[in-house]
Amino acid sequence: MSFDSSQDLSLVIGAFLGDGSFVEDPAYHHHVKLAVRDRELTDAFNLSVAKVLGRKVNAIIVTHDLGKTYFESKYSCRSLGLFLKGPLEQLRPIMNDFPGAFLSGLFSADGCASVSVRSFGLLASIILSNSRIELLSLVEELLRSYFDIHSRTYLARKRGATWRCGKKTVVLRKDSYNLCITRRRDIKTFLSGIGFVIGRKQERAERAIRLIETLGRSRAGEVWRLTSNASSIAIA
C-alpha cells in the first residue's frame, strides 16, 4: 500500500516520530498507535490517520496509568506502521512537501514552551527533545530552509541518567538531545508559521513573548513570577 503526500500524512509522521509506536497485539494484528496526555494532539493525529487511510474516524481510548490519564489513538494498518518506521530518507519528501505540518506534529509530541525568570528577566524558548540526533539535524535544516528559523542542538542528558517519576525511577537508555529556538524573532515565526497543536503550549509561548515585547524582559519577569507562580517551568 502506498501513501500520497499530504498535510495529514506529514502531521502523522511528526507526531509518530515524537510519541508514536507500531505494536502487535496477541492476535498478531499490527497497530499504529499514539497514546499521550494531551487530547488535542490525539484528536489531530486520530483524524489525520483516518484521512490518510480513507477510513471512518476511530474512537479515542482513554486509559490510566499511575494516576495519570492518557488519550490513545490506534489504527490497524501494518503497511502504514512499516512506512512510519522506515528510514528518514523515505519520509523526507513528505516532510519537504508539508514542513509546517510535520514540525507541528513533532514539536507538539516531543517539544515544549519553556519560560523561565532569570536575573536579567523573562526568557522564552521552544525546545524539542529527542534521542535521535539525525532527526534533530533534519529538523534544524527544515526550520532554516523553509522558515528561516535559527536553532541549536546540544546534549541534554547522558545515557544512564536517572530521575524520579512518581514512585518509579526512570533510567535513560540513550543520550537525549535538545534542539532550542531562543531568538524572539524565530519564536514568533515558529508560533505563527508552524505552531503547537496543543493549545496550552502555544498560549504559554505567546503570552511570554507578548509580555517581553510590551514590558521589556525585566518587568516581564516580575509579572510572570507574580501571575504564573512559575519561575522555571516548561510545559512538556
Image: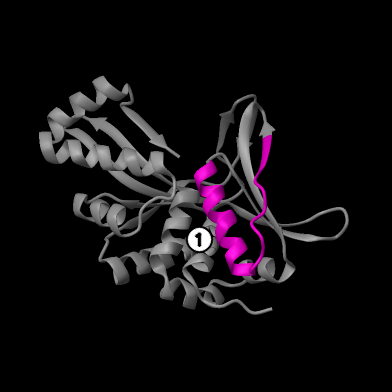
Q: Work out whether 12 lies above or below 108.
A: below
Q: Quadrant of the N terminus?
A: bottom right
Residue 172 location, quadrant:
top right
Q: Can you see residue 182?
A: yes
Residue shown at 22% from the left, 42% from the top = 209
Residue 3: x %, y % from top left:
60, 76
Residue shown at 13% from the left, 30% from the top = 218
Q: Amino acid at mark 1?
A: Gly
Residue at the front extreme of this rendering: 56
* Nearer the observer, 153 or 214: 214
* Nearer the observer, 177 or 101: 101
Q: Start and end of the magenta stretch?
A: 39-63
Principal SS element in the magenta part? helix
Residue 42 on the magenta segment: yes
Q: Can you see residue 177?
A: no
Residue 160 on the magenta segment: no
Residue 166: x %, y % from top left:
60, 25
State the residue position of label 1. 14
